[in-house]
Image (cartoon, rainbow, N blue to C red):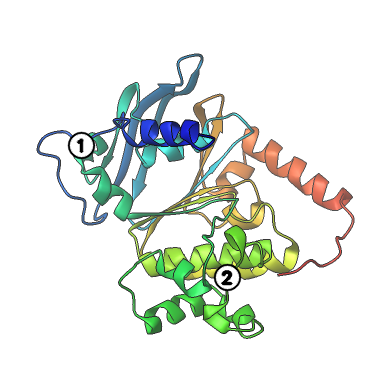
Amino acid sequence: MEAAPSAERFFELMDTEPDIADVPGAVRLEGVREGITISGVSFSYGREPVLQDVSLDVRAGEVVAIVGPTGAGKTTLADLLLRFHDPDAGSIAIDGVDLRQIRRSSLLGQIAVVTQEPFLFSGSIRDNLRYGRPDASDAEIEAAARAAHVDEFIESLPDGYETDDGDAGAMLSGGQRQRVTIGRAILKDTAILIFEEATSALDAKSERYVHEAIEALLSGRTVFIIDHRLSTIRNADKIAVLKKGSIVGLGTHEELMAEEGLYRELMSIQSEEREETPPQRPGAS
């Protein structure tokens, strides 16, 4: 009887029809050959608009950073790329095909996401890596682990790749969990990558390892980096600056720093904070 309300809620959720569904004749996405075009996109959650007339052209293989203050709409833009929602106005297209005309399963199959809070399942580290591609061989898993610097700490664990990571990865440090999720993304081998504040919660040593792991992922992929750290975004091919749901700046780091604007203001604030913050004690990596 105590479990009945939970069971009812579980089946209620399982029986819920998704808001986002494939249209008849939806096509399969095989990769990104030309690029991603965001055209006049506006979106709201039923109240004030979160995004307003956002347009951005991203060529295949480009690294694009999305920056801006809290509440600017950065995460919402990523959610629209993943088609968690559809725009209220405008469109997002890959190689000229609107996301609404693409099979959602194939879209998600071509995107890997690394977020600020890495999520691991209870189980072995090998199984957590394999989640990126269930049919991967052990050799492929270990190659992805090396690229993500997972092997650096695997050697110190009692059972190596078979070590149980604990409840949601509780046996690993934040930097180690993040490297496992990056290894998972490397193994999945997708055309599109989204990094959302992937290094913001890490100490300096862990951040260095994660940055090196991220570099191993970038080649040949179309990448969106949602972050505020200069070290993460300065080498992007282009940087889009969001403010109150609109793009107010677009260019390289050098171009945006050469003009008055929100980007230069954000970078100046960050530089001042770095100078004022005393060195932290090294944490676990």
- How far apart in space, not on screen, are marks 1 and 2 (Cα)? 37 Å
Q: In the rendering, which numbered label is found on residue 212?
A: 2
**Label whose residue precedes the other's in the sequence (1 or 2):** 1
Q: Which residue is mark 1?
A: 22
Q: From this viewpoint, is residue 260 visible?
A: no
Other residues around mark 2 within 10 Å, as few (<14) / some (14–19) / many (≥20): some
Question: Is residue 139 at all visible to an observer of this figure?
Answer: yes
Residue at image position (69%, 39%) is 266
Q: Is residue 64 left or right of residue 275?
A: left
Instruction: Give me the disc on residue 267.
Output: none
Circle 1 packing at 10 Å, graded few (<14), some (14-19), many (20+), is: some
Where is residue 86, by image quadrant? Answer: top left
* Mark 2 secondary-structure assignment: helix
Q: Residue at x 35, y 21 (%)?
A: 88
Quadrant assignment for the C terminus:
bottom right
Three-letter amino acid code at the position of disc 1 = Asp
Residue at point 39% right, 33% down? 13
Give the foreground label among 1 and 2. Answer: 1
Mark 2 is on which residue type?
Glu
Picture coordinates of residue 283 (x, y %)? 79, 66
The correct choice, above or below, for 204 with respect to 5 in the image is: below
The residue lying at 54 percent from left, 55 percent from top is: 119
Decide: is 167 above or below 266. below
Q: On the rendered structure, is 89 left or right of 6? A: left
Question: How many numbered tags mark residues here?
Answer: 2
Q: Position of residue 172 (x, y in %)?
A: 66, 67
Q: Nearer the viewer, residue 177 or 66?
A: 177
Residue 242: where, in percent of width, then height? 54, 32
Q: Position of residue 140 (x, y in %)?
A: 38, 79
